[in-house]
Image (cartoon, rainbow, N blue to C red):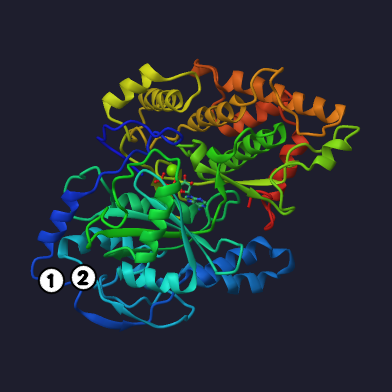
Amino acid sequence: MALMNLSTGPRQRDKVYGRKRLVPLATSDANRSLFAGNDPSLSLEKAVAKLSIKEAHDSIQTQRSAAALNDNQYQEERLPGRCDKQEHDEPPQDVSFAPDEDVVTVSKPVVERKVALSKEERAVLKPVMAFHRVASFARDFSAFGSQLTKEFDVRKLNEGSYSDCFVVRKPNEDVETAVLKIIPLECNGRASSGAASRAYDFLREVKLLAALEDFHGFAQIFRSRIVRGRMHDQMIQAARDWLETTQEDVDKTIDPGSRYPEDQIYGVIEMAYAGTDLDLLEKPSAFQAFDVFWMVAILLAKAEKEIEFEHRDLHMSNICFRPGNEGTVDVSTGFVQDMRKNPSKVLGLSGLRVSIIDYTHSRMRDAKTGEILYNPECPFTAEEMASYKRERRPCDQLDTIVKAQQWMSQSHQIQKDGAAKYETFTPKTNVIWLSNVLYELTKTAGSKKKRCHVPGSSATAKDLQDDLWNKLAKTLKWIGSPDLHSLPESAERFLNEAMDLGLIAKPDVDAFMESLNIDASPAG
Ligand SMILES: Nc1ncnc2c1ncn2[C@@H]1O[C@H](COP(=O)(O)OP(=O)(O)O)[C@@H](O)[C@H]1O
Ligand SMILES: [Mg+2]
């Protein structure tokens, strides 16, 4: 999320954006004063509240295992999660109390607390709830959590700069049903306190997710909504459990139950579970490193070509991996033991799939509306940028941020097309961020002597792994260069030049690209 004017240091294992969060006292006070005379907790109304997670998940599952399904069936199943009804063409008259008409499938009715919004909050949230992928009224957070926890087990997954991410799954099932990204919002129309996201940042993220959902290898959004109030006790407990065990550099003195005021407004994004983030992939094998890097590069090149996509924050926590169709994330011992000649296809041998997530700072052109979505603000203060310049090491995250910012500034100055700096299409940022991904993936492999082979590897398999590491090292030398002018202009150009240089084989790229047009794609 956009993070400004925070002076605490970066997290150890995570993103530079993800820092200790502040308790938004300013928000609390502002909300209280805005609420004068309004009692949000007393009024109860019966509403038919439906969880969209389940049916949308079923839809995505259907989509992913679609080999067996015909097109009509697929369309029917995915409609409820898509919410493409025209009701949102006109903004709702009274967004705070409008019935949730945009969910098509009926689930269990619950008695739900009506939440009030002040005039100012309503004005700020109106465009958000008018967007067809956001529920059209604000729901009581606790009641939403109560319904959720009745049906699902909830576990906190991780947190980002402002967001808390929970994963839900049906009891006794071992498949994650959905991820809930919960983002505290500032809706008072005043200057940001720096402790929560603005409503329009949330809206932009939802729009980006919606635009990217048809791309394999990007996060699959189900639904999003605005909620207000206290987080449900079971979710608070899940957050406490996470806090006890996490290795993240977070402030453990702030209890999740009192982190935010009782009347806090949140944006909630429901999306498909994309797997474990790459930060947790320790000591990748050559097969894994090769797959992750080139799959991400290809996914990026495709989105860049089709919708002018630039991620602009592609560090390891923003890429997830999970087992593919074979249920594995690396080659089997048997496979490397028996290898007597090189396989005809190398990309995909690990069996893992990757997904690119978190588009907080991303830029793209919406193919349907032509709208250019981008974060207009630099996420860093001048002091932060100065310290990154001092502390960076070649190709690490700080260095990548500095290089990407430098390139965007330069391109903007040269282009003079009147567009704002971050609006300008500068696809070389994708290449710059790819160098960071590759740096992180290869850093543990070390020198030739230190490189590990998958245990049990035959001589041929060892040679193949050495060859993959060598090619990755060559690639990093190329795209990790501090001479930004020497880098390919875009991920697409990079891919083409890499094929020419023999760093990746064209049949591998073609086969993976082809798989992206098929529902049960290895990119998920
Ligand atoms: N769809 C998802 N599937 C699996 N993990 C996710 C998903 N979305 C988020 N996460 C986890 O939560 C973390 C924070 O989410 P992210 O979208 O990156 O938030 P932020 O914008 O605050 O950085 C990620 O680094 C990742 O570990
Ligand atoms: Mg993130």
Residue located beneath label 1 in the image: 38
Q: Is mark 2 within 8 Å of ligand 1?
A: no
Residue located beneath label 2 in the image: 116
Classify 69 as above or below 285: below
> How dense is the environment of label 1, judged by Cα within 10 Å: few (below 14), some, or many (20 and up)?
few
- Marks 2 and 1, how far apart at CA: 8 Å
Circles 2, 1 touching at the beta carbon (< 8 Å): yes
Left or right: residue 340 versus residue 519 is right
Name the disc covering residue 163, or none. Answer: none
Left or right: residue 20 versus residue 434 is left
> How dense is the environment of label 2, judged by Cα within 10 Å: few (below 14), some, or many (20 and up)?
many
Residue flagged by tag 1: what amino acid is it? Asn
- Point out the tag, 2 or 1, that comes first from the N-terminus: 1
Residue placed most toward the observer, 147 or 218: 147
Q: Residue at x 16, y 59 (%)?
A: 31
Residue placed most toward the observer, 158 or 311: 158
Residue placed most toward the observer, 487 or 418: 487
